[in-house]
Amino acid sequence: MLVEKNVSLQSANSFGIAARAKRLVRVRSQDDVREAATRFDLARKPFFVLGGGSNTVLTSDVKSVVLKVEIPGMALVRETPSSWIVQAGAGVVWHELVAWTLEQGWPGLENLAMIPGTVGAAPVQNIGAYGVELQDRFHSLTAVDCLTGDVFELDAAHCAFGYRDSVFKHAAPVAAEGAGWQRGMGLAGRAVITQVCLALPKAWRPVIDYLDLQKKCEETGVAQPDAQRIFDWICAIRSAKLPDPAVLGNAGSFFKNPTVTPEQCRDIIAREPKIVHYPMPDGSIKLAAGWLIDACGWRGKTVGRAGVYEKQALVLVNRGDRSDPQASVTGGEVMTLAKAIQTSVYERFGIRLQPEPVVI
Ligand code: EPU
């Protein structure tokens, strides 16, 4: 465990916001987390867990303890008749895990290539892209309960995964299925994920229904791509339309794609015939937030030092100078832009967009 005081978080968040942490604790093992919980009295005092900082907007300096999870390691821990069970430390860079599993000959994560962030952050918001969500490949995870100091394991049901959602995003009670030691409880501000186990299917099949992947099949004439080819396609698709946080600060999609009822959707289509919408298995309709923002004229716009990315209106970017902490975007500027976007989408479509990143 390494404790640092008055540390800049600018390089620890993908927006490049120049906030500082009063105390940053780097934890490299489960024991480090338990030790930090005791030493900093995390059962009683609020703390904030930072992984890759790719889904975080810092609106001020952080006064509570920041736990920077840097737990390493990737290994095959078990093989079942149907799956390879792979375990990774919460501090592993997600994309490195995806690439490593493919190299080992265990496909299944290729559609999730190049999602910024760490393995420990992946279950928190149930990361997803191109037709696959973390929950589709999830086996279990290990975490430390900072309230009691206990180490516990959760399976998928207890994680209560939803669209960019899980029990780790909720501090208040959530409706979780089934029995368990944390039944009905939210774990935000309480649990620190230390290890994640994924079940990679031996009977692998490509997931290529997504329009961008269908286009790749047509362009290349490859109807049944292998996992490596899908990985390469995803990397190319993402690089073409999403900004590289190392070059242009951002936190990925800034808003969740909203869902509406079929009646609401019919009403909107009557006014906006071109609206992008996808029917969901539960009967609701998902709308593309990027399209809504784009339709309101925000794509490419800049307010202060916060901007809307010109190739994907769902991504807000840092238009400031990241090399100078005084000239980089502030969390306040990002939230001002976000609120202006929410207001115009609400005024035009009657839809309230919900931010996807954690706002601190
Ligand atoms: N669109 C526009 N204008 C825009 C942006 C999008 O018209 O400026 C339209 C697109 O043409 C498309 C539709 O909106 O018809 C959806 O866009 P896209 O395919 O780019 O996907 P998305 O719904 O905006 C989601 C995820 C991404 C994920 C992609 C691919 C959310 C909030 N975002 O984006 O996830 O990579 O699908 O699966 O669910 C993230 O969460 O950080 C993230 C990048």
Image (cartoon, rainbow, N blue to C red):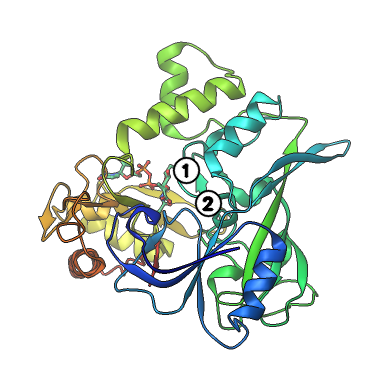
* Position of 174 relative to 208 (above/below): below
Task: Measuring from the top left, give residue 358's x and y in whole percent.
Answer: 42, 67
* Position of 344 relative to 84 (above/below): below
Q: Is residue 350 or residue 308 the one in the foreground?
A: 308
The N terminus sits in image quarter: bottom right
Secondary element type, mark 1? loop
Task: Report the residue marked by disc 2.
Answer: 127
Q: Residue at x 33, y 68 (%)?
A: 20
State the mark number for residue 146.
none
Using residue 18 as the reference point, say whether residue 257 is left or right of it: right
**Which amino acid does the dot numbered 2 rest on?**
Ile
Task: Measuring from the top left, give residue 205's x and y in whole percent.
Answer: 67, 29
Q: Residue at x 22, y 46 (%)?
A: 309
Secondary element type, mark 2? loop
Q: Residue at x 78, y 31 (%)?
A: 202
Q: CA distance from mark 2 to mark 1?
A: 8 Å
Task: Measuring from the top left, give residue 302's x and y in whole percent.
Answer: 12, 54
* Labels 2 and 1: the sequence-earlier one: 1
